[in-house]
Every structure is written in C-alpha cells, then in structure tokens.
Amino acid sequence: MKGREPRSWKIIVPGSTANLGAGFDSLGLALDVFLTVETYEADDWQVIPLSAALEVFPADESHFIVEVVKEVAAEYGRKPAPCHLYVSSDIPLTRGLGSSAAAVVAGVELANALCDLNLTQEKKLVLANRFEGHPDNVGASLYGGFVVSCQHEKGVNLITVPDLPIDVVCVIPKAELKTSDSRNVLPSTLSFSESVGAGAISNVLVAAFLTGDWEMVGKMMKRDRYHQPHRRKLLPHYDAVEKVADRFGAFGVALSGAGPTVACFVEREASEWLFRQLEQSFPTMDVRKLSISQTGSSIITQQPKVRPSSL
C-alpha cells in the first residue's frame, strides 16, 4: 500500500437454492438474499461481523473468505494486500440456501480486485467450483437467474437463463442439517437403468422450466431419484410442508440444496397467498418469500477509502 491510497470495495453476492428436485448438483436458482462484504485495504487482516449470526466465525485471516482470497491469489503467484472486511448477510447459515457458496464467490471477487487478475466469469466459476465441489450454487451466485451446469474432467460448463416468472417460498427449520449427514444417506452407486431414468427426469425438468410448464416442473421434482427419496427421511417436516404448499398454490416442492430448508415454487401472482398460509401453518419455522435475483455477484469500487465510523 506504500505510495498509494488504500482501496475500498463493496461486494454483494446473492444466495441460492440448488438441485430443484431432480437437478442434483446441476441446477441452481439465485435468490434475493445477500452476503455483503465491505472491504478496506489495511495493515492487517480483520473480519468484522455486522450480522449477529456471523459472530461465530473467525475474526482474523483464518476466516473462510480470506482463505479463499489467499488461495486464488496464490494460484496466480500474487500476495493480496491485507484488508478489513465488514461482513453482513441475510442468507440463513447451514440451511441449504447457498451461504458457503456466496462466501466462496465473495472471496474470488475480492482476490480478483485486490490482485488485478482481470478474471472472466468463466474463470471465476472454475475457481469457485474448486472450493464448493459442484457448480450449481456458485454458478447461481456468480451469474444470477436460473443456471444449468455440469462439471467434468476438463472443467465446468454453465448455461444461464435470466428471467423466470416465479417466486420461491422457503420454509426454514431452526435446526440445521449437516451436509455430511445429508450426503451420507445417498447411495454410492446407481445401476445403468436407474441412471438413465433419473437423467431423463432431470432433462424433462429443465425443459419444463424453460418452457414455463409449471405443472410438469412439479411432477418432475416429485419424481427425483437422485437424492430426495433418501434425504426426506431425515426431515420430518418435509411431507407436512409439501401438503400445505400443494394445497395453496405451489406448483412444485423440493429440498433446497442438501436441506433442511424446503423450497416451494410458485407463480409470482400467487406467492403472497402461499407465503401467508405457510407462515400460519409453521409458526416455529422461518418462512420467507423470495424472488429470483436476476443479477449475480457484483463488486463496486467505493469512496471514501476509509470506512466511516458510523457504519
């Protein structure tokens, strides 16, 4: 930082819901809940939580976002300048709404800015995918909208669809479900015929989303063979949420990511009614009516360069 003024940025990253039923580790949808990181170059690394839920994380350079920044920079032979990070988020933690993926994307964006890497969106996706392990959540957080993605031995491919006329009402239990527990109930293999059947259902699900055939979307979500038949056994609230959602206007219901959140998909004009009914039916849970975030992550160069004490 010697010889120049310290720089400052504001990074905003949307959360996401992934899998969407039969699109296991492939389909993602960006949602209008956000991780915000205000960053100021400084003499040391500090992470200051502005949301109470974030106080459980380290306040120094062992914080996950900082670790991502350092690893991405090291990939290009750079050493990032230390920063103070002021972090706030309305993405529920460990609930299957992409909180960790948003943190990864924030780290990639910050490394790109700090080290002047000039990364393309495609390169950001490849880097983020290395940390997350699958491109559905990070892809949605990076690009916004509805994403269809895959990873393979040569990298990652992703198609994004910016606008779907739907909302997502999420029913979020107080108790978390560890991703490791949710992964452990999945089968290690599928037979060839089972794989063909599961893939066909996923194909029809994508086609139904793209053509606005919401009734077919709901049918394909229910016919998922990859993960929901195994995971819903861990979630006693799933059947009850599905029953209420079906009754009051949802065209589809699916686990959000690995759970425990249940995502209820609904056409925009019916979303407020569905939200009220689910909120009334599940008073001990956090029920949120969310819209699709049409834009992905953004980073803005800030002025002033020193964070105001009033913030």
Image: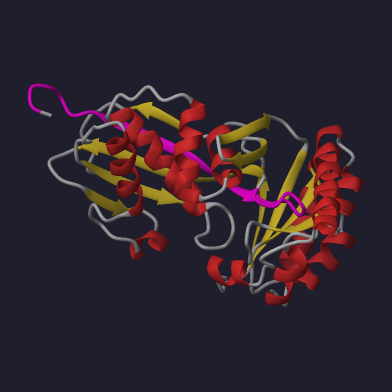
Q: What residue span does the magenta drawing correspond to?
A: 2-25
Looking at the rendered structure, the number of numbered marks drawn on it comes to: 0
Residue at image position (19%, 40%) is: 82
Residue at image position (50%, 53%) is: 99
Residue 243, image x and y in percent? 85, 68
Q: Residue at the far front: name it.
A: 192
Q: Is residue 185 above or below residue 298?
A: below
Residue 251 appears in the figure: no
Residue 4 appears in the figure: yes
Q: Is residue 228 above or below residue 297?
A: below
Residue at image position (63%, 67%) is: 260
Q: Is residue 268 above or below residue 169?
A: above
Residue 253, image x and y in percent? 79, 57
Q: Is residue 286 above or below residue 27?
A: below
Residue 86, image x and y in percent? 31, 46
Q: Quadrant of the N terminus?
A: top left
Q: Is residue 23 magenta?
A: yes
Residue 137, image x and y in percent? 58, 46
Residue 274: quarter of image: bottom right
Q: Is residue 186 magenta?
A: no
